[in-house]
Image (spheres, rainbow, N blue to C red):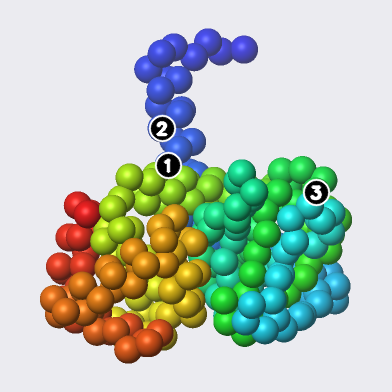
Amino acid sequence: MDRVDGRNKEACMEYSGEQQQRNVPEAVTADDCLAALLDDERQALLENRKEIVFEAGENIIKEGFVASNVLYLEEGLVRLNVLVDGRHSAVNLVSPRSFVGLICTFASHNLMCSARALEASRVSLIDLKLFERFVRQNGTFALYLTRHISAVTSRIVHRLARLKDKQIDGALSVLLLEFAGIYHSADYTIPLNRKEIADILGYSKESVINALSRMHREGIVKVNGRKIGILRQDTLRKISQTG
């Protein structure tokens, strides 16, 4: 066997990295994962897929239940929660064309998270055993799925770290901008009441009400019940970074 010196080894690693970058999208989405399935696998998925519609407020995943399906959100909006010290804390907001709770599905036999529909949501259920078969037999799918789970986990960790030391104005600004990104609009109806916003941010309902009223008075956002209009996005973004 030919010996590979340090420079050649480095060149091989660079080439391998370049090959991987060409073949795998930089930010792997749920749809990228499903697109990596072979024709017969895609057909098997379609034949075994089931759809369920959940109304706003309904539980989609219950913590402690046995994981038997992989969930894919077709339409709607879902809140992903974990139970910490007897209290449910939101760790992610799941928008359409995304897996729901995938990072928990393979973590243990029983699900360590819960999920609730924030608005009417249509979910596809994919049999977990079928999904695991795809992982075992399709290396590209397995690679994409690993990259996707890593990306989702990274986003959740960064989101929680970002909110951890925020004052109420900063935390609320992060959430309002997050919903603007989900709805692709500065004007939207937030699918949460004040208590639910407070639960997500870890503040009291009164703190949320006061912060929203202050932003409204200062002309940063327009608030009318659950209707939100971001009037000064640059200011709100600055508060989200420094507040």
Q: Give the side of residue 10 with respect to residue 186, left or right.
A: right
Q: Quick check: 118 above or below 172?
A: below
Tell me what residue is drawn at x 40 percent, y 58 percent: 203
Q: Which residue is mark 2?
A: 14
The image position of residue 69, as x and y in percent, is 80, 62
Residue 241 on image: x %, y %: 23, 54
Q: Nearer the viewer, mark 1 or mark 3?
A: 3
- The amino acid on which the numbered mark 3 sits, given as a three-letter code, is Asn
Question: Could you say whether the residue bearing mark 3 is in a helix, strand or loop?
Answer: loop
Mark 1 and mark 2 in contact? Answer it, CB < 8 Å. yes
Q: Earlier in the sequence, mark 2 or mark 3?
A: 2
The amino acid type, in three-letter code, at marker 2 is Glu
The CA distance from mark 2 to mark 3 is: 40 Å
Q: Quadrant of residue 78?
A: bottom right
In-front residue for pair 194/137: 194
Q: Earlier in the sequence, mark 1 or mark 3?
A: 1
**Quarter containing the C terminus:** bottom left
Instruction: Give the quarter of the figure containing the N terminus.
Output: top right
Spatial CA distance of label 1 from label 2 is: 6 Å
- Residue 232 location (% of width, % of height): 16, 76
Q: CA distance from mark 1 to mark 3?
A: 39 Å
The residue identified by callout 1 is: 18
Tag 1's secondary structure?
A: helix
- Residue type pointed to by label 1: Glu
Residue at mark 3: 110
